[in-house]
Amino acid sequence: MELEALADELGRLLLHLGHQVTTAESCTGGGIAEAITRVAGSSAWFEAGYVTYSNAQKTRQLGVPGDLLEQVGAVSREVVEAMARGARAASGAHFAVAVSGIAGPGGGTPHKPVGTVWLAWAAGERVFSERHLFPGDRQAVRRATVRVALQGLIELARGEKALQG
């Protein structure tokens, strides 16, 4: 219910602003878009969702440079910021959120343990990003990522995220 309430609040804000949002998701596998589209009438403010689980799709669908993925890895500030910019450009939406992380149970390293998630939000040409280390199992990490992604979009739509950028 919490995710639906966040998505509903986001929708009200975007309707008021006359803007749309897009999502670029890796570790959440479309969970942010799913939470948004649970809200009746979301077609008025949700433009498109990109599930780019593989690096090849991050490049193909969102224009993330392949050499950037090789240099810093998919779970990085640079890549999620490129994903957010690419989703905005591809969809034409004013706002975007992008996520890439290690939900587990495997795949973690000492530098990027399980639960590491990078999120980026874009509004126009401005992009903001954050790194989180979420506790719990795969489901908990994915759910926390969706929650923080929606909360960040709400802050961005309210003009609050700009203060952190």
Image (tube, rainbow, N blue to C red):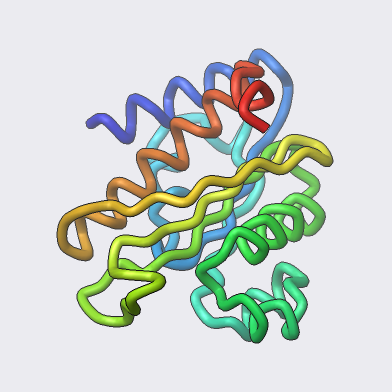
* Residue 45 rendering spot, x and y as whole percentages: 62, 33
* Residue 102 rendering spot, x and y as whole percentages: 36, 69
Number of numbered discs on residues: 0
* Residue 76 rendering spot, x and y as whole percentages: 56, 65
The quarter of the displayed image where residue 160 is located: top right
- Residue at 51% from the left image edge and 69% from the top image edge: 75
Q: Nearer the viewer, residue 105 or 60?
A: 105
Which residue occupies the extreme left position in the image? 136
Q: Is residue 5 above or below residue 90?
A: above
The quarter of the displayed image where residue 21 is located: top right
> Can you say which quadrant of the picture contains the N terminus?
top left
Residue 135 seen: yes
Q: Nearer the viewer, residue 39 or 106?
A: 106
Which residue occupies the extreme front position in the image? 110
> Can you say which quadrant of the picture contains the C terminus?
top right
Residue 145 left/right relative to 90? left
* Residue 7 rendering spot, x and y as whole percentages: 43, 31
- Residue at 63% from the left image edge and 85% from the top image edge: 56
- Residue at 65% from the left image edge and 86% from the top image edge: 70
- Residue at 32% from the left image edge and 35% from the top image edge: 3
Q: Nearer the viewer, residue 160 or 30?
A: 160
Residue 87 left/right relative to 116? right
Residue 14 seen: no
Q: Is residue 19 above or below residue 72?
A: above
